[in-house]
Amino acid sequence: KKRFKTSRVEIYVNGQTNFRYVVPLPIRYKSNRGSAKPQLLSRAQAILRDHFNAISVDGIEADDAVSMRQHELNKEGVDNIVITVDKDAMQCEGKVFNPRNLRLTTVDKFGSLRLKNSDSGKKLVGTGLVWLLAQIIMGDKVDGYLPSDLHGKRVGPVATYKYLSGATGV
């Protein structure tokens, strides 16, 4: 509240259910992560709910609810900031603060893409709608969601960038 001079804070935590776990895909959502969750996660979520009025989200992930709330607030003309380390938050128009790198990013509706070098080769990063489209095309290895599991053709970051980089709007 102090850093951003906000009048209100909303905290969202994952509930017990998520539709993604029951979607009949060839590979179960997040099955690549193993079953171990951080040891104190459920306790931390309980503290957030009990002492900070965190909203427990069922049916979808907390980051989905945060993005929908940000969109709602944007439509109402309410200035807001999402604080998260989740790269998916960079898909929604608005302000996103990453507490790991202390970077505040203002995401415009269409957004942008850029290729950067990583230890494992090229990595695509982005913002806005074009970043959402890129993730739909490439999939998300972190979440174990890969469209190639359905159609057999893998589309990597370089091809995705080439495919979308000429786009200038919706």
Image: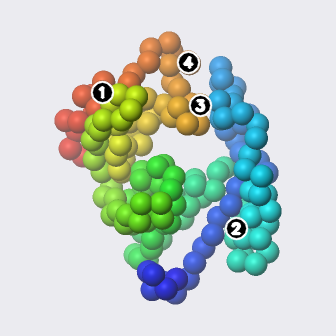
Give me the residue at 65% from left, 20% from top. Answer: 26
Q: Nearer the viewer, mark 4 or mark 1?
A: 1
Task: Determine which of the numbered discs, if any, sits on residue 144 in the image.
Answer: 3
Indicate the secondary structure of the residue bearing disc 3.
loop
Alpha carbon of mark 3 to alpha carbon of mark 4: how far? 13 Å
Vertical arrangement, residue 59 with respect to residue 108, above or below = above
Vertical arrangement, residue 81 with respect to residue 135, above or below = below
Disc 4 designates what residue?
A: 150
Which badge, 2 or 1, is on the more N-terminal residue? 2
Which badge, 2 or 4, is on the more N-terminal residue? 2
Which badge, 3 or 2, is on the more N-terminal residue? 2
**Amino acid type, residue under disc 3 in the picture:** Gly
Task: Determine which of the numbered discs, if any, sits on residue 55 in the image.
Answer: 2
Task: Determine which of the numbered discs, if any, sits on residue 158 in the image.
Answer: 1
Alpha carbon of mark 3 to alpha carbon of mark 1: how far? 20 Å
Tag 3 near tag 2, CB within 8 Å: no
